[in-house]
Amino acid sequence: MGRFTDIYREIQDVIFPPRCPVCDGLLSPYEHLIHSDCKKKLIEIKQPVCMRCGKTVVTERHEYCDDCKRTVEDCRKYRKKDFYKQGKALFGYKGSIKESMYRFKYANRREYAAFFAETAVDKYAEWIRQCGIEVIVPVPMHKRKRRERGYNQAECFGRQLSEKTGIPMARGLVRRVKNTEPLKQLGYVERKKNLDGAFQVLDSIVKYDHILIVDDIYTTGSTIESIGHAIAKKGECSVYALCICTGQGK
């Protein structure tokens, strides 16, 4: 099957030449997934980072970004369990990646997922192995929004990551049953309320102990935490996250 898949992709690349995820220009047969000059324009996540979500923080003295610090303090204060173990991201959400993410989400540039997944494996393969990840779960879209857009960009990323790591992806394991408002327009408290009851988890999730949630852009972590809370209602499980982009922590 592997050889037939390679041949199919070679034919597909001739008919529909892949595009660079940064400039959106066509790639030549000698260029792999991205133009070499364009790759330099991406801002990779580097230390120091928040030890919980992986956002870049100002100095190494900051263990957590402001969002994670607030969540950790709330868990301690109200003696709640933190369902979200740790997260990682590939790029800072600034510069050229912003337009790339827009096209990936809204302009049907699903082929970008191959570059993002390969970068994820290059950067975090060992972390994924150490976490003992058993299944990859893309952050789901509400069926109405998915029907309008035609695809889920987080699922495209997850599928490519699954192919490159050999870890299965489970598309329907977590479902979004509430068509929530765009989170970027909401504050911390409003995000929490907006996501309350937004996700439904299948009973079969109990067979996994270590789950990797994947998404395109990480902001405050409210979505990952909401999914983690929904999973925890079914049973004990360690939830990790891997996103393509993340904002700057404080």
Image: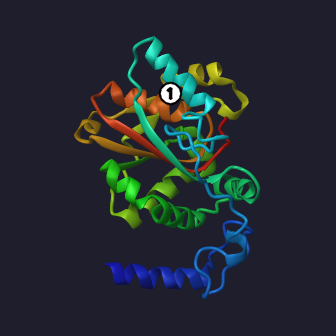
Q: List the residue tagged with mark 1.
A: 198
In the image, residue 226 above or below residue 118: above
In the image, residue 6 above or below residue 166: below
* Nearer to us in this view, 224 or 153: 224
Q: Residue at x 71, y 53 (%)?
A: 102
Residue 158, given in percent of the width and then of the height, sits at: 46, 55
> How many numbered dots are placed on residues in this image?
1
Residue 103, given in percent of the width and then of the height, sits at: 70, 58
Q: Is residue 101 visible?
A: yes
* Nearer to us in this view, 115 or 47: 47
Q: Is residue 71 left or right of residue 240?
A: right
Q: Is residue 138 visible?
A: no
* Coloration mode: rainbow
Say what amino acid the circle numbered 1 marks: Ala
Q: Residue at x 53, y 64 (%)?
A: 119
Which quarter of the figure is the C terminus placed in? Answer: top right
Residue 93, given in percent of the width and then of the height, sits at: 69, 49
